[in-house]
Image (cartoon, grey):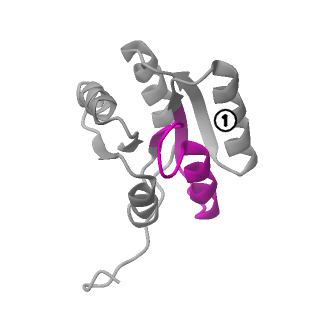
Amino acid sequence: MRVLLLDDDKFMLDVLADMLAGLGPHQVLCETDGRRALVELRLRPPELLICDLSMPVMDGIDFLRLAAAQQYGGCVVLLSGVDGAVLKTAARLAEAQGLAILDACAKPLAIDTLVALMAHAAARCQAQPGPRLDNNGK
């Protein structure tokens, strides 16, 4: 499964990527910048996006709004250290914009929670084709 991790905390990205590597042959891309992550969503859409809410420059809410505007069709897991009520509200907002939210989880993410999320994603999330590019990348 292709997974995009978006978090401004490099350590958290490394931990999540290591956890995913232990769960199977997943293609994992890590981004700390929402703008670069939006490009990845458009060019190589992952089946699963795991997105932090609290980030500088572009927070998770803005990122998800723009991902919905791009018609991202994969699944989303929200991940944050914010209050649980805020996390659930963000999930409802993202769903209202048309995103497929699998769950909204508090940091740090436990390995058993990640295992369950990956099983749920494997059953529910379809690969979304990216745009067809010519030999010049256009």
Q: Is residue 56 left or right of residue 31?
A: right
Q: Quadrant of residue 95?
A: top right
Residue 88 position (above or below residue 72): above
Residue 64 position (above or below residue 104): below
Magenta stretch in the rendered image: 49-78
Residue occupying the far front of the picture: 56
Q: Is residue 21 left or right of residue 118?
A: left
Circle 1 sits on which residue? 91
Taking the spot 30% from the left edge, 47% from the top edge, the residue there is 29
Residue 16: % across, % down: 32, 29
Taking the spot 39% from the left edge, 51% from the top edge, the residue there is 33
**Is residue 90 within the magenta segment?**
no
Taking the spot 62% from the left edge, 43% from the top edge, the residue there is 100
**Which is more toward the observer, 79 or 122?**
79
The N terminus sits in image quarter: top left
Residue type marked 1? Ala
